[in-house]
Image: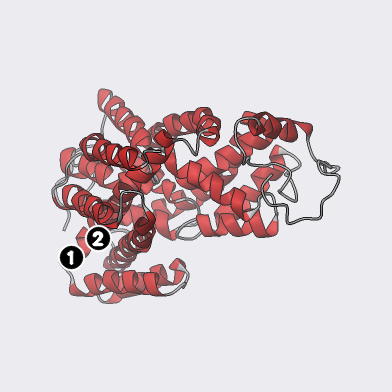
Amino acid sequence: MTPVLAPAPTGSAWGGVFAQFLMLSLLSIGGAISTAPEMHRYLVDQHHWLSSEQFSAMVAIAQAAPGPNLLFVAVLGWGIGGFFGMCVTMLGILLPSTTLTLAAARWGEARRTTRGVQSFVMGLAPLTVGLVLSTGFILGKPAYGDPWLLATMIATVIICVRTKISPLWLIAAGGLVGAFLG
Amino acid sequence: MSTPETTPEPAKMPAPDEVPSITSAASTADAASPHTILDDDSPRSPASPAEIFRVFNRLALQGFGGVLPIAQRELVDRERWLTREQFLELLAVAQVLPGPNVVNLSLMFGDRAFGWRGGLAALGGMILAPLGVVLVLTVAYTRYAQYPTVAGALRGMGAVAAGLIFATGVKLLPALRKNVLGPMPAFAFVAVMFLCIALLSLPLIWMLGGLGALAFAMAWRRLKP
């Protein structure tokens, strides 16, 4: 069940992690969760600091808890290096985007109707949607080998699209299905 | 500015607890844009950074599986710090900028009200307490992950979390019909993006640099005045 994982990053590897999250912050148009595929590629596929299962579980913890989805970044950081790891990933993901937001908000607000900003918004919209769908697909990977989990995921999509039921109930139901059937 | 649904007051009557910096910040922006955030349309204003912190903390702790719906309810309906239109405008800008939408929204709201102190208060309120909760859950997870039931429950919750995110994407699809690119090209961009990221695991930066530039160019051409 648990594939062999690389030891936690040390020294200069932390610099790499920090740089990676700084870059992801600037790419996180449409929300932090839209960079989850890239984090998965970096942390799981490339460096093997986390297994795919751990990655999905960590995102699930952050989704189940109250607060912005962004907090999954804190959990991932904690997972690869405890409190220090959490500070590295959270500072990395927050510093560039908050700085840019403070600087650019008024600029963009004043030019919201200009052709350049409109083209940017309109052009990026379908890419953002594709990215959100990809994120759901990649996070679902551990479920694809298990018919119960796969059914749970598909049912979640249908229920969530068709009804306004609180996600909390779905997550609780998923926990029960996973505990006793998955 | 646009449509005063309120009675035509001798306008610009600051509430007693209103801080002058808000109105002055709004009026400087007024010159450039017809719509401003935190202008006089909003019925009430936050009294202090501490109040911003308190309200954002409260709404973040209610937001299971996403804060955005709660943020709208609290800021628009309950506190009446923003009108519905102002909220949408803030959100639109928040979505264009990189970074988590809700975090950007908080930051901009706080910054407009009290400068960087307000921004920091909103950000802190949004993040600090939920961070504590999530860390407790993480520690519990790492301690109990070896129990099959706990690991199974997390797998089940993971499947739901993945489904929730996928569903968010599905719910965004109809909005693309109004995209200036036209529905067919827009859906094609969605499909190519999904293929390259989800199935081929290509790095995101390639996609934004390549496909993003193409989409921008197409939108730019179609928006020709």
Question: What residue sits right under mark 1 in the picture?
Answer: A144
In front of the other: B22 or A156: B22
Label 1 crowd (10 A; few <14 / some 14-19 / many >=20):
some
Residue A46, above or below B115:
below
Discs 1 and 2 lie in a common subunit: yes
Q: Which chain carries label 2?
A: A
Residue B148, above or below B96:
below
Q: Can you give x and y, in whole percent of width and height, for residue B50 in the image?
A: 70, 40
Residue furthest front in the image: B225
Is B199 positioned to the left or the right of B17 in the image? left
Task: Indicate the secondary structure of the residue bearing disc 1.
Answer: loop
In front of the other: B137 or A28: A28
Work out how far the residue at label 1 is from the one at label 2, CA to CA, in angstroms. 7 Å
Res. B157 image quadrant:
bottom left
Residue type at the position of mark 1 = Tyr
Q: Can you give x and y, in whole percent of width and height, for residue A133 in the image?
A: 28, 56
| Quadrant, the C terminus of chain A | bottom left
Is B131 positioned to the left or the right of A139 in the image? right
Res. B46 image quadrant:
top right
Q: Can you give x and y, in whole percent of width and height, for residue B98 in the image?
A: 41, 37
Residue A74, above or below A135:
above
Q: Give me the residue at 57% from left, 54% from top.
A: B71
Q: Residue A140 carries which label?
A: 2
Q: Verify CB contact (< 8 Å) between mark 1 and mark 2.
A: yes
Is B24 positioned to the left or the right of A68 in the image? right
Q: Can you give x and y, in whole percent of width and height, for residue A135 in the image?
A: 28, 53
Residue type at the position of mark 2 = Gly
Label 2 crowd (10 A; few <14 / some 14-19 / many >=20):
many
